[in-house]
Every structure is written in structure tokens, then in C-alpha cells.
Image (spheres, rainbow, N blue to C red):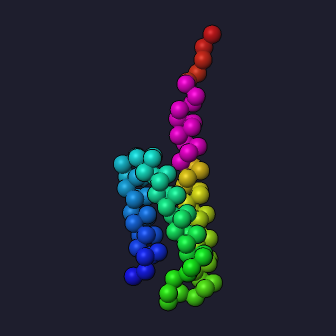
Amino acid sequence: MDFILFSAVISFVLLVISFAFKMFSLGLISSMAIMVVGIALIVSGVTGLDTILADNLGIIYVCLGAYVFINGSLEQIEEYNFGGRIEW
């Protein structure tokens, strides 16, 4: 098993764990890891996969990781609400 695929499996397992236990920091780290795996897939590919398939899989990983990262960050920002509502 290639190191890239092993890293992808570990990243997705960490992402599922972060969703299950509501650990937002682990979710952000695992989404960054998914983006890194996607970039590694685009650059070097995987043995046994066609180049076009590896490139498309890498693009999907980068987009999925970016979506989870941005969505999780926005959720944390909305939850924090910059100190709450100010009443005069």
C-alpha cells in the first residue's frame, strides 16, 4: 500500500473521529492533511492508478479538505460571535 493512500485513510479516520467527538481543532488539522494528500496525489500520483484518475482524485481531496476547513472555521467564528451581543 502506498504511503499516500495510507495517509489518506489516516486523515479520513481522524476526520470521522473529530466529527464524532466534536473536536473542531482535530477536524481542521485532518482537513489540512486531506488537502496535503490531495496535492501529493496531483504531483506524484499512485502506482497502479492512471494519471488522469490520480489527478482527479487529488483535486477531489483538495476540494473536500478545503470545504471542511472553511466550513468548520466559519462555524467556529459564528459560535464565538466576537464576544457575544453588546447591549447598551
Find out whether residue 53 is within the magenta segment.
no
Q: Quadrant of the N terminus?
A: bottom left
Residue drawn at x 55%, y 60% as measured from the top left? 65
Q: Examine the rendered structure and indicate whether residue 52 appears above or below residue 62.
A: below
Q: Examine the rendered structure and indicate whether residue 25 appears above or below residue 3.
A: above
**Which quadrant holds residue 3?**
bottom left
User: Is residue 69 rendered to the left or right of residue 6?
Assistant: right
Q: Quadrant of the C terminus?
A: top right
- The answer, for residue 57, to whether it is visible in the render is no
Specify the principal SS of the magenta part.
helix
**Which quadrant holds residue 63?**
bottom right
Q: Examine the rendered structure and indicate whether residue 82 appears above or below residue 50.
A: above
What is the x, y in percent for residue 38?
56, 69
What is the x, y in percent for residue 43?
60, 76
Find out whether residue 80 is within the magenta segment.
yes
- The answer, for residue 33, to whether it is visible in the render is yes
86 and 10: which is toward the camera: 10
**Which quadrant holds residue 14?**
bottom left
Residue drawn at x 58%, y 69% as measured from the top left? 39
Residue drawn at x 51%, y 58% as measured from the top left? 31
Residue drawn at x 45%, y 47% as measured from the top left? 25
Residue stretch in magenta: 72-83
What is the x, y in percent for residue 46?
51, 82
